[in-house]
Image: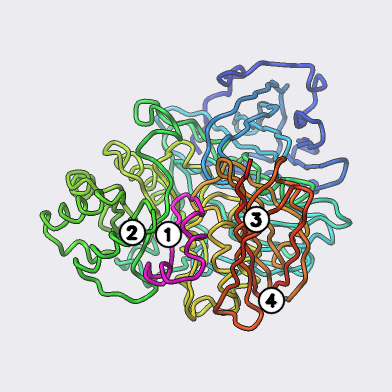
């Protein structure tokens, strides 16, 4: 083993004020600013462990920290040093759930040493009011070393968990189980969401700032524990998509890292209710801010705007140049900002591409063009592709088929985002892993897939799936579900449910699955046209419950939307409008038609914040209303 150089304490954070008063002299504890959430580390018998508590109740039981380098376990026979504390408080522009993120935390950084081999490293931890996180830093110079990890997350007894395995690589449906019923060796793709017993709150486990490292999945031990497994240990979900016969062998090899090894953050989001989880900023807070040279106004840089898109893939239509011209025309008629075109565009000449770009731009529509990631593995290939898009004036790229989380693929994401940013191009990743806050550093990542979305034509049980996603997969960040379909793909959901998904799912690139002619012909087209791709504020309302019902109030500017996704059980629901802020409002309402799932009822009314809406929701039904002030 090549040993790291000794850790030196005192590496500060930008804009951080040290405060030894936050912690006892030798404590390895960090508490949230509101003092309700605690992350505790302890060394006992030379082993390193941690635990998490919220409002005095256990969220993560005492669990082993297990990390190593070059095959050596560096968490046995260890001693910890005195911690250095910190605090930080800032706000910055964001995109998706709300338009301003709050980055307020207390921090702790402490050295760990292992005398047997003179290994020294650091653990850095942060506690927000709604999350805790920690990571490992192994100092080094130019040597190449291989990190590994099997840290445990042990959940309290009688917790209820929602998870899916790695089938389809982040594109599967969720199981709901009591944690004790999860079998040994079952896989869970983060985020892993769980509800504590006795109304103790909710939590979700994922990672943040995945850079220069392999991605994390979780593997159950059958005893309420979930163990970290890095990318080379994940099951290969799509071997039939790997072009070369040695690809499976290559991505199953450990990934070396040169110089200092900094792991991603291990994140546990915690809240008393689902609203706290959905509004948690921790994942992107833990990522670096964007380069001001590439993004002079950060998330508000003019060429990285969110928007709605048309897309010819799921709902008939010809793959021709003239048909795509018509799609751009209809995108303009809908007021949508983008048009996503699959790979058949590559058969067009540069002149045709430029013609369509110019035609679309005249209608306020930018083109996003598809490419297989396999064709972008060399600098020359990337230059050719991105230069062609930039020279034609395209808005961005949709890049597909990554399909695993080995370090080489994680590195490729970063390279693609950097090359696209240099040319002022936005990016949509498909066949991808879960987001880990990348769009804070790279605002040109408008969205990525990593979700069982509308492309899954055989998913007939969409009601429970759709009512689960806002509280599981979407906690990691944006997801390209490509929502809203009025045909058989909608499965066991109604038209009103389908339209409401566009307002509940967080999709800064909101790509509609339905053919634009079907959108324009729908009785609710006025509602669809008005749903934005990003939000200023989000409130998750009762009686929201994972897999059963999602009730969201979301604000864009002065307009509020109330959107409901019902699960598989019909119900009568009464929702208070107290989220509205004073005065009177006009309401445009789209409801289920009780006699026909493939129809909607439209109504217009006037309401006040003291009013409530009563709705009869079909099994798999939905509801959406738009409120505009009449002051």
Rendered location of residue 168, percent (x, y): 49, 68
In this image, 385 relative to 87: left or right?
Answer: left
Q: Which mark is residue 340?
A: 2
Tag 1 residue: 511
Of badges 3 and 2, the one in the foreground is 3
Q: Residues within 10 Å of mark 3 (few under 14, many from 20)?
A: many
Q: What element carries label 2?
A: strand
Tag 4 residue: 618
Q: How far apart are marks 2 and 1 (CA)?
A: 8 Å
Residue visible at 25% across and 49% down in the picture: 361
Q: Nearer the N terminus, badge 4 or badge 3?
A: 3
Is residue 177 in view from this perspective?
yes
- Rendered-image quadrant of the C terminus: top right
Q: How far apart are marks 4 and 2 (CA)?
A: 33 Å
Q: Distance between the residues labelled 3 and 2?
A: 28 Å
Q: Nearer the N terminus, badge 2 or badge 1?
A: 2
Q: Is mark 3 on a helix, strand or loop?
A: strand
Q: How crowded is mark 1: few (under 14 residues within 10 Å), some or many (20 or more)?
A: many
Residue segment shown in magenta: 508-532
Q: Nearer the N terminus, badge 1 or badge 3?
A: 1
User: CB under 8 Å between callouts 1 and 4?
Assistant: no
Q: Which of 608 and 246 is in front in this view?
A: 608
User: CB under 8 Å between callouts 4 and 3?
Assistant: no
User: CB under 8 Å between callouts 2 and 1?
Assistant: yes
Q: What element carries label 4?
A: loop
Q: Is mark 1 on a helix, strand or loop?
A: strand
Is residue 231 in view from this perspective?
no
In this image, 402 relative to 542: left or right?
Answer: left
Tag 3 residue: 562
């Amino acid at each position: 083993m090549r040993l790291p150089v000794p850790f030196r304490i005192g590496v500060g954070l930008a804009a951080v004020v040290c405060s030894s008063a936050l912690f006892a002299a030798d404590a390895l504890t960090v508490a949230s600013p509101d003092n309700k959430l605690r992350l505790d580390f302890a060394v006992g018998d030379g082993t390193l462990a941690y635990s998490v508590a919220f409002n005095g109740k256990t969220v993560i039981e005492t669990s082993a920290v297990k990390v190593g380098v070059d095959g050596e376990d560096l968490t046995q026979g260890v001693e910890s040093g005195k911690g250095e504390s910190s605090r930080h408080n800032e706000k910055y522009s964001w995109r998706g759930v709300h338009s301003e993120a709050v980055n307020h935390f207390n921090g702790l950084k402490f050295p760990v040493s292992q005398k047997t081999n003179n290994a020294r490293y650091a653990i850095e931890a942060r506690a927000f009011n709604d999350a805790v996180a920690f990571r490992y830093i192994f100092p080094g110079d130019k040597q190449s070393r291989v990190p590994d990890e099997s840290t445990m997350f042990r959940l309290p007894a009688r917790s209820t968990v929602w998870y899916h395995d790695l089938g389809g690589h982040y594109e599967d449906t969720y199981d709901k189980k009591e944690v004790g019923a999860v079998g040994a060796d079952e896989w869970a793709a983060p985020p892993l969401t769980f509800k504590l017993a006795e109304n103790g709150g909710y939590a979700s486990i994922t990672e943040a700032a995945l850079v220069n490292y392999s991605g994390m999945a979780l593997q159950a031990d059958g005893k309420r524990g979930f163990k970290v497994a890095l990318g080379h240990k994940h099951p290969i979900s799509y071997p039939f998509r790997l072009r070369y016969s040695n690809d499976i062998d290559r991505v199953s090899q450990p990934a070396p890292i040169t110089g200092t090894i900094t792991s991603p953050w291990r994140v546990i989001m915690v809240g008393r209710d689902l609203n706290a989880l959905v509004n948690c900023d921790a994942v992107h807070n833990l990522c670096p801010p964007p380069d001001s040279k590439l993004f002079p106004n950060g998330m508000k840089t003019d060429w990285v705007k969110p928007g709605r898109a048309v897309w010819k893939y799921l709902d008939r239509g010809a793959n021709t140049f003239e048909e795509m011209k018509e799609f751009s025309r209809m995108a303009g008629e809908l007021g949508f900002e983008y048009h996503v075109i699959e790979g058949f565009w590559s058969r067009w000449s540069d002149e045709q591409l430029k013609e369509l770009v110019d035609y679309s731009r005249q209608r306020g529509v930018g083109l996003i063009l598809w490419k297989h990631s396999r064709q972008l593995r060399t600098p020359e290939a990337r230059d050719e592709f991105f230069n062609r898009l930039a020279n034609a004036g395209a808005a961005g790229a949709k890049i597909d088929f990554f399909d695993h989380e080995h370090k080489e693929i994680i590195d490729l994401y970063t390279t693609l985002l950097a090359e696209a940013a240099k040319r002022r191009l936005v990016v949509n990743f498909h066949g991808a892993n879960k987001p880990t806050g990348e769009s804070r550093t790279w605002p040109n990542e408008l969205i990525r897939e990593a979700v069982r979305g509308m492309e899954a034509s055989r998913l007939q049980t969409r009601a429970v799936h759709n009512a689960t996603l806002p509280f599981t997969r979407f906690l990691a960040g944006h997801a390209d579900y490509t929502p809203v379909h009025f045909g058989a793909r909608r499965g066991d959901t109604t038209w009103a449910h389908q339209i409401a998904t566009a307002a509940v799912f967080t999709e800064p690139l909101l790509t509609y699955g339905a053919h634009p002619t079907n959108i324009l012909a729908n009785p609710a087209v006025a509602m669809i046209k008005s749903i934005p791709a990003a939000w200023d504020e989000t409130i998750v309302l009762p009686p929201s419950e994972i897999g059963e019902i999602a009730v969201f109030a979301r604000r864009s500017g002065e307009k509020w939307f109330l959107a409901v996704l019902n699960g598989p059980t019909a119900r009568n629901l009464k929702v208070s409008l107290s989220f509205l802020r004073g005065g009177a409002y006009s309401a445009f309402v789209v409801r289920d038609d009780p006699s026909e799932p493939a129809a909607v009822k439209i109504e217009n009314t006037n309401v006040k914040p003291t009013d409530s809406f009563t709705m009869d929701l079909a099994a798999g039904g939905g509801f959406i209303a738009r409120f505009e002030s009449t002051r």
